[in-house]
Image (cartoon, helix red, strand yellow):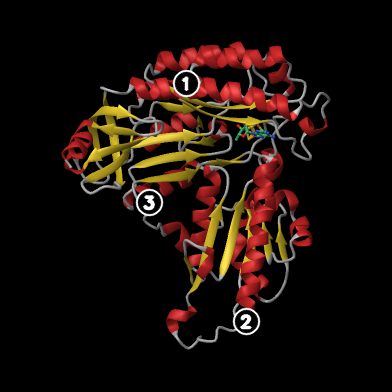
Amino acid sequence: MKKADPASDNPAANTRKVFVKTYGCQMNVYDSQRMADALARDGFVETSTPDDADMVLLNTCHIREKAAEKVYSEIGRLRQLRARRQKAGADLMIGVAGCVAQAEGREIVVRAPAVDFVIGPTTYHRLPDVVARARRGEKVVETEFAVEDKFEHLPEQQKRQVRSRGVTAFLTVQEGCDKFCTFCVVPYTRGAEVSRPVAQIVEEARRLVDAGVREITLLGQNVNAWHGEAQDGRQWGLGELLHELARIDGLARLRYTTSHPRDMDDALIAAHRDLDMLMPYLHLPVQAGSDRVLKAMNRKHTGDDYRRLVDRIRKARPDIALSGDFIVGFPGETDADFEDTMRIVRDVSYAQAFSFKYSPRPGTPGATMDGHVEETVKSERLQRLQALLGEQQAAFMKSLEGQEIAVLLEKPGRDAGQLVGRSPWLQPVICDETVGKIGDSVTVRIERASANSLISSEAANRRRAA
Ligand code: 5AD
Ligand code: SF4
């Protein structure tokens, strides 16, 4: 911190605390953990509130305008907190990481001078150095795309050290995107597609399993674009990588997200058929149903290409459930185009979905296209789409009532005698503690489904008896 700690001869007072606030996608969740690990080596411990923190690190999201604006409001609140601290003779360091940091860079310290440092997603391995410079009073903006590999540059000690993170963990296998969908900032904020090498991924997965993890979700902005070289020199895609990871003793479940329809190759579809531990749940965004809009979005597939792909995946793994992302009101989208989106949703049927109004992102081709859609029209369309998706989600949840399903037990439940686990389709499942212990994969019968969670028969019985 810039000011000396008045109680610095007390060792407990020398522990500095960092509060990391994460916005946006799971990749940010993973990056936040890694940044916290890097700062731990510098003596920082994590805290769950800014109120007792010496440093607040905002790991930001730039995907839609609202997401970016939230960051500036948060900085405003932190500025006030810092002013109060300074009055009391202490200080607060404020750092901005993530995609807003990458996209806006120096703009952030101009617009919000309270910010001490700005660091982009490809340079997190430089975080300890950035913090050290900021502590010396420099305003650091570190957003040049790193030429070195941020994973390879993790210090050995940090590579070995895995904090126990419970039963499930994320593992980044790929970052960046070369697809350039015309609405999306990711290719600009996260840079070109980079795949991590097989050996690094397998090593990290083994370390996670050794630390007690039973379910790994492979992460990437375009995860199924992952490619690498096997030990024998063969070229592998994500399907082959999943087979390799499935051989790790003690690992019970695998997932991956987020996928692009164009990168669902035969080997990956076959992995869904051949690997029981690959969970039957796939996030496969289509974004829109109209071929004209898909073309303007530069998705490079049609609605029917997507339908055929879904058929092939369902043939390989009949119990697979799909989730998706949708954008309404992309420039030029007519009522008829929007009806095509509604039609593809009806044809495919989703267990879960995320849907958004198109939000023009500076620097992307979509932002300067003709035919921007009125906000009220976007809202109406979003409402109709969400009503349909909501019905489908409710129907999927209802279909699980009375079924026996596999649950990976994750943590104690809210009430005594309960454990909470996850279904293969990611819903929390409330179980009775007698079914097993945390980390076990068990089979339970589902008594009832609510909007977002499931309750097993034994847990429902206990509740009734209580
Ligand atoms: N406007 C609205 N939604 C967007 N998404 C990405 N960019 C935009 C944008 N400019 C959505 C897409 C993507 C998800 C992560 O966010 O649906 O799949
Ligand atoms: Fe963005 Fe498209 Fe790349 Fe996904 S595939 S990150 S939507 S550009």
Asked if the residue at tag 3 contacts the one at tag 1, i.e. Cβ–Cβ closer than 8 Å, the answer is: no
Q: Earlier in the sequence, mark 3 or mark 2?
A: 2
Q: Which residue is mark 2?
A: 3
Q: Please name the amino acid that badge 3 sits on.
A: Arg
Dot in front, 1 or 2: 1
Q: Who's the residue at 58% across and 44% down the image?
A: 24
Residue 227 % position (x, y)? 54, 34
Q: Is residue 466 left or right of residue 177?
A: left
Q: Please name the amino acid that badge 1 sits on.
A: Glu
Q: Is residue 360 left or right of residue 351?
A: right
Q: Earlier in the sequence, mark 1 or mark 3?
A: 3
| Cα distance between the residues tagged 3 and 2 | 39 Å
Dot in front, 1 or 3: 1
Q: How many marks?
A: 3
Dot in front, 3 or 2: 2
Label 3: few (<14), some or many (≥20) within 10 Å? some
In the image, 124 versus 32, the foreground residue is 32
Q: Which residue is mark 1?
A: 391
Going by the picture, which residue comes out furthest to the bottom?
Answer: 9
Q: Who's the residue at 37% across and 19% down the image?
A: 319
Residue 85 % position (x, y)? 60, 75
Query: CB of residue at label 2: within 8 Å of ligand 1?
Result: no
| Cα distance between the residues tagged 1 and 3 | 41 Å
| Cα distance between the residues tagged 1 and 2 | 56 Å
| Secondary element at image label 1 | helix
Image quadrant for the C terminus? top left
Q: Earlier in the sequence, mark 1 or mark 2?
A: 2
Label 1: few (<14), some or many (≥20) within 10 Å? some
Q: Which residue is mark 3?
A: 207
Q: Who's the residue at 41% across and 46% down the image?
A: 169
